[in-house]
Amino acid sequence: MEKYIFVLGRDPELSKDELYCYLDSRRIKYKVIEENDIVIILEVHSIKSKEMIKALGGIQKIAKVINNIDNLYHGKENKLRYAVSCYSDEDVSDLKSQLKNYFKKEKLKASIKKSHFQVEYLMPSEAQNVLEIIVYKKYLGKTLAVFNPKEHKHRDINRPEQRPLHTISIRLAKIMLNLSEVNKGDTLLDPFCGIGTILQEAMIMGVNVVGIDNEVWCVEASKKNLEWIKKEYNTDVKYTILKGSATNLRNYVQTVDCAVTEPYLGPFLKKLPTEGTAKRTLIELAPMYSKLIDGLGKVVRKKAVIISPIFRTRSKMELGITTLERDFKKAGFKFNEPYIYTASKSKMLRQIWVLTK
């Protein structure tokens, strides 16, 4: 077994559990060496790092722990850029000197790259096509794979249909899919599919998908986007998009392996709501959630991952739907405390619930 360093994203608890769910669902054995809000160090059998980084939404970098910098570079070019990214308080000046000597000895024209941000490590956007050494305490790692934000941007802006402000991020969609532990060949349901973001990411993972939406435009937009995904990523998985209500799921599907969805979260907020407005919105949402959860309990075989809103009010209160846990139990789901996810510039918090049959 080899040791690997996984650099976590901005939601460390989500990132950690997403990684563990990814490994568990693929029956990859691992041992946790160190875990905190910055990195996870695992002892694990050989992994496909580039495949992993594309599948995971909450991991920024994957590096293999090395004992020294001997045989560091195996490329054919004699010109390269390198970086030392330090995620702890270590003094890396000696390491930088050793690297200079190593490149000189190997007759390589190497120039060091530093971050444009006020940090001692490269951001993912800066670490593309760079030979990067990661330092964390006593550990030295050679970066094998880095999250590439351009890949998300490509899918986001080049798919046929867009719906700004009403679409879940690709990053969050991937995290939720991995938390569901859906596997290649499974069938996944999104009963609030919108333009198909969750479904498209599932298809790239090799998952068959079923989407439901009550708006004709969304149904047609999803079909266009998913057809584009099939061609763009050369996948032969199946998709079905239906016009219908998420409150009557048995009318459309009999059984699915998993469900992942961001339901309707209430009207778009331009500013923080008053306590009264927030409570009225939550009262209106509660019956929809009850029927949705009841339906999921009848059709989902393994896991469901859903989002519910927490409204921040002008009086600095945080209010959510109070009947959810009762509904989960009634539908036959086991659950833990939800993750709290904050999107940038959002007027609400998102609770992410992982429900297990």
Image (tube, rainbow, N blue to C red):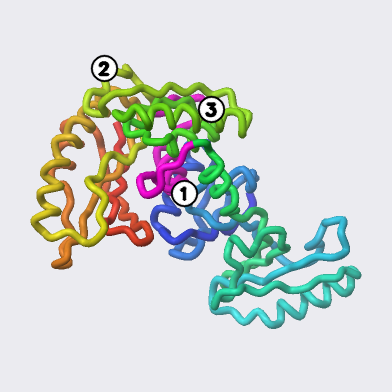
- Left or right: 259 with respect to 222? left
The 10 Å Cα crowd at callout 1, few under 14, some 14 to 19, many 20 or more, is: some
The 10 Å Cα crowd at callout 2, few under 14, some 14 to 19, many 20 or more, is: few
Q: Between residue 168 and residue 6, name the one nearer to us.
A: 168
Residue 3, by quadrant, is: bottom right
Residue 326, by quadrant, is: top left
Q: What residue type is disc 1 on?
A: Arg
Q: What is the distance, in whole Å, between disc 1 and disc 2 at their CAs? A: 31 Å
Secondary structure under tag 2 reads helix
Q: Identify the magenta region.
A: 161-188
Q: Between residue 71 and residue 185, name the one nearer to us.
A: 185
Foreground mark, 3 or 2? 3
Q: Residue 110, percent across and down?
A: 81, 71
Residue depicted at 17% across the width and 59% down the height = 273
Q: What is the distance, in whole Å, between disc 3 and disc 1 at their CAs? A: 21 Å
Q: Which residue is mark 1?
A: 171
Q: Residue 44, percent across and down?
A: 58, 48
Q: Residue 357, percent across and down?
A: 29, 31
Q: Is residue 166 magenta?
A: yes
Q: How many labels were placed on the picture?
A: 3
Mark drawn on residue 185? none
Q: Between residue 187 and residue 243, name the one nearer to us.
A: 243
Q: What residue type is disc 3 on?
A: Glu
Residue depicted at 57% across the width and 28% down the height = 230
With respect to residue 16, does 198 lie above or below?
Answer: above
| Cβ atoms at labels 3 and 1 below 8 Å apart | no
Mark drawn on residue 227? 3
Q: Which residue is mark 2?
A: 251
Comes first in the chain, label 3 or label 1: 1
Comes first in the chain, label 1 or label 2: 1
